[in-house]
Image (spheres, rainbow, N blue to C red):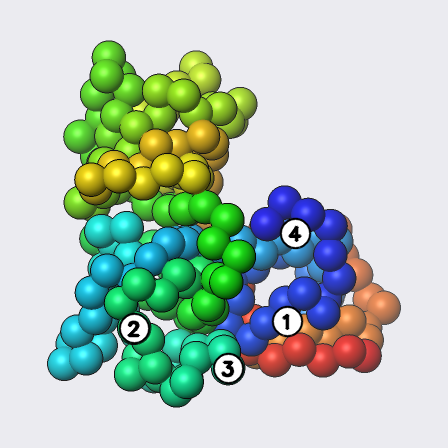
Amino acid sequence: EGQPATQSALDVGDVVLVAGTVNEDGVTGVAERVIADDVLEGPVESIDLSTGQFTVLAQTVVVTADTIFDDDFPMRTLEGLATGDIVEIAGFVGDGQIIATRVDRDDGNDGFEVAGFITSLDTSARIFKINDLVVDYSAAAIDDDFPGSTPTEGDLVEAEGVRFENGTLFATELDLLGNRPRIACNGFDDSSDDECDIEIEVGEVVGTLDNV
């Protein structure tokens, strides 16, 4: 979330971006930087138990057998969720939906956040859509990573804001996420001292947390 932290800040089910080196065995490695961020934050708008889905900020969130629910919920399943709950969701942005790996209650309610692909971009009005959500970026701070300092159709972005009205998120920050490879992992093991010079940067699902 943009703040320095230790491994204790990670939870099982978080999706992290790992940069570091791969050992000679090609399996283990040493992480030099680990970045954890949510892909969605906001109020639950609807819940469909029959399909295992719910919506937040007009985004369809898919719950699987591997989705972790925080123990703040009365039941650590989709049945423990209620409309109006403010949640933070870690997961993967898919084709028109988000595959949730972890769902946390956000009692702080410090704003709204959504990641997804830009469609219906109107550079004159400075608005676009992420699925059915309209994003107004007219007052947003734009990430320097955007080519030409402006978003384009199809970009994978993250929009953050503190105002959400009538289906529109008024963004205060707009970041370019780009296309990063993502794989699932079972945990961390930094016991090996053999390193090679291969640089890696991949997104992983935190499966277990071991302090070694």
Image position of 107 (left or right of 27) = left
Residue labelled with disc 2:
82
Image position of 22 (left or right of 14) = right
Above or below for 208 versus 4:
below
Image position of 50 (left or right of 106) = left
Front residue of 8/211: it is 8
Residue labelled with disc 1:
27
Say which of marks 3 and 1 sits in front: 3
Residue labelled with disc 3:
71
Q: Amino acid at mark 3?
A: Asp
Q: Residues within 10 Å of mark 2 (few under 14, many from 20)?
A: some
User: Who comes first in sequence, dot 4 or dot 3?
Assistant: 4
Residue labelled with disc 4:
19
Q: Amino acid at mark 1?
A: Val
Q: CA distance from mark 4 to mark 1?
A: 15 Å
Proximity of marks 2 and 4: CB atoms separated by less than 8 Å: no
The disc placed on residue 206 is none
